[in-house]
Image: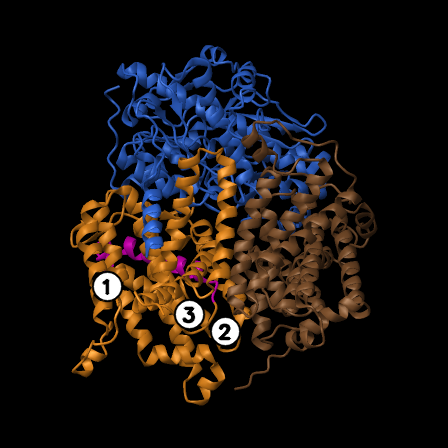
Chain colours: A blue, B orange, C brown
């Protein structure tokens, strides 16, 4: 009996122990995943996210003099765990959520709106959240899935000297909510540009894609676009190399364009392209600071081997945008200890120009960002990166170009209107400024 | 001394056949129910609701369902995730088509629809047995998930194939959607679980339950003494799927609020429920609850202790958590292969003899 | 010949190859089930663990590097430039044998005479454990598997078959992955050596005796424990081979453990207790799912392979409930 009471006490205590950061800290919870089928990718992103805040704390003493903390909660890319993580961290004054999973994002959209906590889904999540009037608490700047599809098509069109008429484009996609996102956009674009679109779903996890790639080999599409995640990417790139599909005609979305995805294919992956919304590589001044204040000080989130990789950079960029928004919020509301509602305002008025990026040690890393109340989606600029297998690094081969606003804005308006109607949401009033 | 069976005399058949014939058991159950209904709703907050109580209730329901099939009828099934998806999608279609419908009706109807599907996929069990059947039910798992992912009608043609639960009510109180108060969602699930746990308890004590157990213990012998395997197996599949369908509907509509089939109802969910049933105790209603509690609360506990308590690097904590969970499951099965329910039985025995164990 | 006909042949060929890859995983299941009646869910994770260990030895990683660094504040990563492939494979095998020994000592020994479902559950626990342990030991990042096996489409076959199509039709020749051909060769070698081992060695005969009847085997003086260690070691070796093959395709990462799911339909189709069954079952599943995807998959939206394999297996089971080559189930009251 004693043992039982003891166990019960430990259980109750354990459930109550949620990390207790001092209230004065700025709290940026991380819903990360370091285990499971997508753990290798999730870990890099999480390292970047945590390291940037560590850098701010170590070098600048935090944001506006207030230290930032990043309590981490493992979701394993599972939606129910995501909900649990959200509920267990939100009570500690969480400022902004970045779940790095489209499934969890969908889950959290109504919840964050209810609790008035902003959520930033950078390059993933629900695309129509770019409409700030309907999705008051969800942000997906600087670019979204549909921008990616559009920029890819634009790039392909440039390759073909502006004419895609009669070309065959195949979309290989992860058979889930995430993978299905670009279909509508690509269908619209195919009407506009006159190319022929073919869809090839790949089921999770995607280790066996022989059928799909045999089909591609038979039909010889001019281009293949991929929306994959996890092992699906590595296998697809390897199979593409095996059937000797011209790699420069094979373009992935930004979640299919990390070192993890191309290295297993070795030389064969040379020339593979992916779209991206931020710079690549470790040639930015900020990495000197990270090496000095974070890695060498033994404060890196992981073992430090991920620094400078694509997904690490993306995590770092996400943290940077969050930190800048927090700083904006501090200025707007003239207080150091901002609340989540104030953080939301900060995100809605976030402005980052090239000068500021240079100041932050990342010149030319990302496009200028100008979030407004109506537009939570940012500029929608993206560039194409290409893999150099010999040097084992990605290189940007285009400028940051704009997506096809005409088509995407119409789709966003349509989808967000449907959501608003279904959930009886009234438009946020954006006239106050 | 503390737990006494002797001296509890009955004067009528009805009293002798009631659900809990022992006074002590009855008091205990009433006490727990009173606590759950009268105390918890006043202290519940979002964290306890979403991280602990709702998942516990939802998964208890699923574990009850699987325990009927696997624990009582002996049919190993790994299609639980797929059947939960049926319940979830049925409830979604019902919620969208009939906005005025009471949520209790929605959940129960979803359960009934799942029962139909369950009967269909239960047919092979008449011919296939043991692990072969387990893997055959995986066909249901993968096919159903693929179907819901593929046919746009199921998710009302939304762009990404996600389904989201709109706000629906029970007697004017919202129980789905983000704005639903914690106490309402909790009570909603609690009522369903309590009512159907009671039903399950009595089913398993009745003729039907005994025919299941006869099939489980030796199907040929059961057939010889006149138990129809067709009826017993299919009724087990139907009722088990009914429970699992309801838990799927609750999982989607009340707990998660939105879902996509490949992730929310994947194969790992089937394993999770099977886990609960085995860890809790095969063929025990109490075991279903204990198993669900163990597997829902334990990881939360581990996570809080590992990250909150020791401040280890996050990646190490995540990996160590897996090592500990795996290790503990093995340890547990080595120490007590008959599940937590067996622990309870042993405890009762101890209490019976206390303070004179010899 | 019309290109369509050649395409069907190509699909069948590739289905055969994919089937052999599934068989490689299924083999490990069969070995353990035969000898101990345990349905070893952890076989996939064992493949992952073996592959991780192999790559770790090849590249000279320090095991538990991050744990050591975090605990003692040191900075260790590698202990040299690594070993050559052959030595690394030997060392990995040693690790797998050690693992089998520990498993028998700590867990299996206490599980004698438990119900099959409990044993099954234990292996799921084992799967969790090894997944976390493998990540802890070697890190969770995606690693490159390179044991010198060639890969990529075969030029030779492509050139030869190009001319087969009838004049004027557009045909690019037949495709087959050289890695798959190697895998097929290795699988055949593996099955032959396993068969020879169990037919002509003393240990092999003991293995078969245990598979036949535990108690009878024990009465003639066969040690069940040592047999289990041997069987789990062999399964570890099969897992290593599967890990190498699948790892060469996708890199070594967590998803490698999910190949177990691809092996299950193969297993039920072939029967849990038959080594040839695992191979034939693999071939049938491989061809079946690829042909279905090729012929009808496109019409009903694609990505059918996952469930079709199970439905196919289910269809076979309706006629033979014990799988194609499984031992006939005799029931008595």
Sequence-wise, the earlier of marks 3 and 1 is 1
> Closer to the observer: label 2 or label 1?
1
Q: Residue B114 placed where, x, y %?
A: 37, 65
- C248 to C305, vertically: above or below: above
Q: In whole angstroms, how far apart are the C-alphas of marks 2 and 1?
A: 39 Å
Q: Is residue B78 magenta?
A: yes
Q: Position of residue A268 (x, y in %)?
A: 71, 36
Going from the N terminus, do you reach mark 3 or mark 2 first? Answer: 3
Name the mark on residue B124: 2
Side of B231 where B54 appears, left or right = left
Q: Are marks 3 and 2 in contact (CB under 8 Å)?
A: no
Q: Which mark identifies residue A270? A: none
In the picture, measured across the screen, residue B235 lies left or right of residue A161, that is left
Residue A18: which quarter of the image?
A: top left
Are marks 2 and 1 in one subunit?
Answer: yes
In the rendered view, would you say B5 is above or below B50? Answer: below
- Badge 3 density bin: few <14, some 14–19, many ≥20, Cα 10 Å: many
Q: Give the CA separation, mark 3 to mark 1.
A: 22 Å
Quarter of the picture containing the C terminus of chain A is top left
Q: Which residue is mark 3?
A: B71
Q: Residues within 10 Å of mark 2 (few under 14, many from 20)?
A: some
Task: Tell which of B206 and A260 is nearer to you.
Answer: B206
Check disc 1 and report its element: helix, strand or loop: helix
Q: Is residue C17 left or right of residue B139?
A: right
Residue B111 is left or right of residue C248, and the answer is left
Classify 10 Å Cα crowding around label 1: few (below 14), some (14-19), many (20 and above).
Answer: few
In the rendered image, residues at marks 3 and 1 fall on the same chain: yes
Identify the magenta region. Answer: B77-104
Residue at (55% x, 16% y) in the render: A292
């Amino acid at each position: 009996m004693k043992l039982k009471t003891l166990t019960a006490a430990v259980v109750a205590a354990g459930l109550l122990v949620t990390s207790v950061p001092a209230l004065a800290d700025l709290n940026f919870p991380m819903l990360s995943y370091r285990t499971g089928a997508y753990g290798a990718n999730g870990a890099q992103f999480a390292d970047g996210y945590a390291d940037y805040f560590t850098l701010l704390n170590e070098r600048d003493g935090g944001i506006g003099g207030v230290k930032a903390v990043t309590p981490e909660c493992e979701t394993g890319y599972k939606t129910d765990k995501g909900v649990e993580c959200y509920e267990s961290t939100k009570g500690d004054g969480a400022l902004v959520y970045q779940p790095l999973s489209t499934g969890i994002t969908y889950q959290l959209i109504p919840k964050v709106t209810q609790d008035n906590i902003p959520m930033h889904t950078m390059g993933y999540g629900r695309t129509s959240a770019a409409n700030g009037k309907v999705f008051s608490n969800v942000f997906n700047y600087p670019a979204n899935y549909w921008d990616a599809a559009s920029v890819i098509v634009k790039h392909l069109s440039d390759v073909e000297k502006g004419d895609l008429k009669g070309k065959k484009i195949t979309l290989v996609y992860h058979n889930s909510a995430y993978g299905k996102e670009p279909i509508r956009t690509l269908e619209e674009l195919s009407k506009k540009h006159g190319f022929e679109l073919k869809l090839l779903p790949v089921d999770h996890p995607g280790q066996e894609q022989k059928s799909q790639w045999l089909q591609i080999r038979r039909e010889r599409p001019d281009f293949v676009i991929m929306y994959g995640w996890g092992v699906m990417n590595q296998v697809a790139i390897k199979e593409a190399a095996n059937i000797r599909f011209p790699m420069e005609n094979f373009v992935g979305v930004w979640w299919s364009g990390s070192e993890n995805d191309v290295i297993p294919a070795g030389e064969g992956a040379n020339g593979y392209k992916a779209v991206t919304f931020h710079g690549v590589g470790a040639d930015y001044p900020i990495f000197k600071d990270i090496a000095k204040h974070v890695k060498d000080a033994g404060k890196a989130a992981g073992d430090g081997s991920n620094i400078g990789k694509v997904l690490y950079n993306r995590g770092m960029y996400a943290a940077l945008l969050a930190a800048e928004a927090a700083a904006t919020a501090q200025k707007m509301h003239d207080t150091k200890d901002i609340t989540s509602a104030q953080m939301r305002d900060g995100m809605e008025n976030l402005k980052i120009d090239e000068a500021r990026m240079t100041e932050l040690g990342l010149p030319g890393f990302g496009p200028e960002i100008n979030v407004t109340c109506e537009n939570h989606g940012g500029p929608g600029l993206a560039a194409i990166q290409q893999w150099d297998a010999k040097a084992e690094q990605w290189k940007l081969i285009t400028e940051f170009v704009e997506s096809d606003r005409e088509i995407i804005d119409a789709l966003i308006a349509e989808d967000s209107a449907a959501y608003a109607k279904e959930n009886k949401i009234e438009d946020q009033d954006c006239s106050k400024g | 001394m503390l737990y006494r069976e002797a001296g509890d005399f009955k004067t009528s058949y009805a009293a002798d056949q009631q659900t809990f014939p022992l006074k002590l058991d009855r008091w205990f159950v009433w006490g727990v129910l009173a606590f759950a209904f009268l105390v918890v709703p006043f202290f519940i907050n979002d964290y306890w609701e979403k991280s602990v109580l709702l998942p516990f209730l939802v998964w208890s329901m699923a574990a009850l369902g699987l325990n009927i099939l696997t624990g009582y009828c002996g049919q190993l099934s790994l299609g639980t995730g797929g059947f939960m998806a049926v319940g979830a999608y049925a409830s979604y279609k019902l919620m969208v088509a009939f906005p005025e419908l009471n949520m209790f009706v929605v959940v129960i109807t979803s359960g009934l629809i799942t029962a139909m599907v369950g009967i269909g996929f239960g047919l092979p069990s008449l011919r296939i047995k043991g692990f072969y059947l387990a893997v055959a039910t995986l066909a249901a798992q993968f096919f159903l998930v693929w179907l819901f992912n593929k046919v746009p009608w199921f998710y009302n043609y939304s762009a990404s194939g996600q389904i989201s639960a709109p706000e629906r009510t029970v007697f004017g109180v919202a129980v789905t959607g983000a704005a639903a108060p914690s106490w309402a969602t909790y009570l909603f699930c609690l009522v369903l679980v309590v009512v159907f746990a009671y039903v399950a308890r009595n089913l398993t004590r009745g003729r039907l339950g005994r025919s299941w157990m006869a099939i489980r213990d030796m199907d040929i012998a059961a057939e010889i003494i006149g138990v129809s395997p067709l009826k017993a197996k299919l009724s087990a599949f139907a009722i088990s799927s009914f429970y699992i369908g309801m838990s799927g509907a609750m999982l989607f509509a009340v707990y998660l609020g939105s879902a996509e089939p490949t992730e929310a109802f994947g194969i790992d969910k089937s394993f999770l429920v099977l886990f609960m049933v085995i860890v809790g105790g095969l063929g025990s209603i109490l075991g279903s609850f204990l198993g669900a509690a163990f597997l829902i609360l334990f990881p939360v506990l581990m996570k809080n202790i590992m990250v909150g308590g020791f401040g280890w690097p996050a990646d190490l904590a995540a990996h160590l958590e897996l090592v500990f969970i795996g290790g503990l499951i093995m340890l547990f099965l080595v120490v007590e292969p008959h599940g937590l329910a067996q622990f309870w039985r042993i405890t009762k025995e101890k209490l019976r003899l206390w303070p004179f164990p010899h | 010949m019309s290109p369509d006909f050649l395409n069907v042949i190509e699909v069948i060929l590739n289905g055969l190859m994919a089937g052999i890859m599934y068989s490689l995983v299924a083999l490990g299941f069969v070995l353990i089930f035969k000898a101990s009646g345990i349905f070893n869910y952890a076989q996939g994770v064992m493949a992952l663990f073996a592959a991780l260990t192999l790559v770790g030895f090849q590249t000279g990683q320090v095991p538990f590097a991050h744990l050591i660094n975090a605990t003692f504040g040191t900075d260790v990563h590698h202990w040299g430039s690594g070993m050559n492939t052959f030595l690394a494979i030997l060392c990995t095998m040693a690790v797998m044998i050690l693992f089998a020994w520990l498993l028998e000592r700590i867990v299996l020994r206490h599980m004698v005479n438990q119900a099959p479902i409990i044993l099954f559950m234990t292996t799921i626990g084992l799967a969790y454990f090894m997944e976390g342990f493998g990540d802890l030991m070697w890190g969770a990042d995606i690693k490159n598997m390179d044991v010198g096996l060639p890969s990529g489409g075969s030029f030779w076959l492509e050139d030869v078959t190009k001319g087969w199509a009838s004049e004027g039709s557009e045909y690019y020749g037949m495709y087959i992955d050289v890695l798959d051909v190697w895998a097929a060769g290795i699988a055949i070698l593996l099955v032959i050596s396993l068969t020879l081992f169990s037919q002509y060695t003393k240990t092999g005969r003991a293995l078969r005796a245990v598979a036949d009847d535990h108690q009878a085997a024990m009465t003639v003086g066969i040690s069940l424990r040592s047999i289990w260690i041997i069987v789990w070691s062999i399964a570890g070796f099969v897992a290593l081979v599967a890990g190498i093959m699948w790892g060469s395709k996708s890199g070594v990462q967590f998803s490698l453990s999910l190949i177990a799911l691809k092996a299950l339909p193969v297993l039920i189709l072939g029967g849990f207790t038959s080594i040839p069954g695992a191979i034939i079952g693999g071939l049938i599943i491989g061809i079946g799912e690829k042909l279905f995807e090729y012929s009808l998959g496109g019409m009903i939206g694609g990505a059918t392979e996952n469930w079709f394999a199970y439905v196919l297996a289910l269809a076979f089971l309706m006629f033979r409930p014990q799988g194609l080559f499984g031992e006939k189930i005799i029931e008595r009251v």
